[in-house]
Image: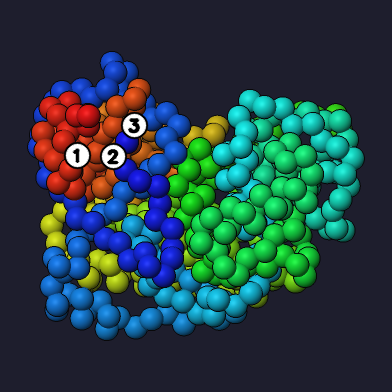
Amino acid sequence: QPVQAATIIRDSDKQTTSQNTQTTTAGTQAGNEGGPGYENSTSNNTNSGNTQSQVSAAAKAAADAITKPEITSEAGILYDVTNGRVLFEKNADEKLAPASTTKLMTALLVLEKSKLDDKVTFSKTAVTNLESGAVKIGLVEGDQVSVKDCLYGLLLKSANEVANGLAEHVSGSISAFADLMNAKAKELGCTNTHFVNPNGLNSDQQYTTCRDMAKIAAAAFANQTLCQIDSTLSYKFPATKAAAARTITPGHKMLYPNDSRYYAGIVGGKTGYTSKAGNTLVTCVEKDGVRMVAVILKSKSTHYADTKKMLDYGYQYVNTEKGNTTGNSTTTTTTAKQETAGKWVQDNGSWRYEFADGTKAVGTIYTIDAADFGFDPDGKMVTGWKMFGTDWYYFESNGTMAKNAWRQDSGKWFYLGADGKIVRNTTIDNKYKVGADGAWVQ
């Protein structure tokens, strides 16, 4: 597999790699007859951009001269996952309550220790061991729900009894699962984190730091199944003993294209709130070939604004540092239409885009708010693999085009260049050769 999981932050991790994003035009169809279909990869991140030796001194100086953001939250950090470095921090080592951002660790461990079609049987303890006002999805003792459905309930609804049930399913008890969480945190390099429950409800013994949570989030969002679940905008949770089937949606507002807080390139994230923790927010974004994780802890309703400030600063920094080097800046296909006005409209579970003049995005790739999206002939936003013209592209679950990244189909790996097209007949990172069909030649 020619790509490693997301870099985990440690003081010694200051890794950068070079990459070859040379592209050629070829009409050969990649993968199977139906097109390369991404299937459950656990690694979707690749290091990109220039090594320090390739960055001009002037560009580096210009990047360093950019004014750092001022945030009002108690603590925050911006981690450049791709290049293994912290770009901004405020009180990043202060021990604070994580609230429901805890559930990223819970989800990661469940995916590592369980199968999606496993059945979780909810005990009385799981559904009642909750504080007053805790978010629930309406499960009762004896309910049986698949791990897959539970993960949607955990990450989208942030249901606390679901976290308890998953913990008991994996480890037999909540306390045993907390031990597993602490062991995993230590494995990821966390030094100021301690868990006593899987949901993040108030406890003086449960704490983390922005630096540690960034490590956890980087590992969590290296899992493609978690990314797919976490970025889903609407999911039908099945009927259970005490409740009919219900539609659940994520709480992270930056995921919604029609929300003013939407952030182009978002991979996923997790919200949190308790009386002790205040607002907490984890956000993972990947664009311009760079993946970043932003963490905010102990905020008083400025968590989205502070996150945006950090991310805007980070992408301005890395793009300035690159000196607008060809192959690293965001590019679009020749058929792309630039668009900054208009609105996103949801239609029977599909997303469409209407321009300011009333026309709709149809049948090609459009650049909307600095991100590239593909639309089928019916005007529906596409996800997964899609051919436009003679080239294959991959669109993430939130619709944004993947660039400078590996994606898989039927056991074959394909590399998508800076323009989003499958790269052919070249060598990536001076190491991985791809053939005429774009597949990695192992």
Viewer can see residue 87: yes
Q: Residue at x 29, y 27 (%)?
A: 412
Residue on which the image places disc 3: 408
> Of the residues under marks 2 and 3, which one precedes in the sequence?
2
How far apart in space, not on screen, are marks 2 and 1 (Cα)?
Answer: 7 Å
Residue on which the image places disc 2: 2
How far apart in space, not on screen, are marks 3 and 1 (Cα)?
Answer: 14 Å
> Of the residues under marks 2 and 1, which one precedes in the sequence?
2
Q: Residue at x 54, y 34 (%)?
A: 349
The three-letter amino acid code for the residue at tag 1 is Tyr
Residue on which the image places disc 1: 432
434 vs 74, left or right, is left
Viewer can see residue 400: no
99 vs 26, left or right, is right
Q: Which residue is drawn at 16% across and 36% down?
A: 433
Q: Which of 49 and 24 is in front in this view?
A: 49
* Circle 2/circle 1 CB separation < 8 Å: yes
- In the displayed structure, would residue 268 be above or below residue 382? below
The three-letter amino acid code for the residue at tag 3 is Gln
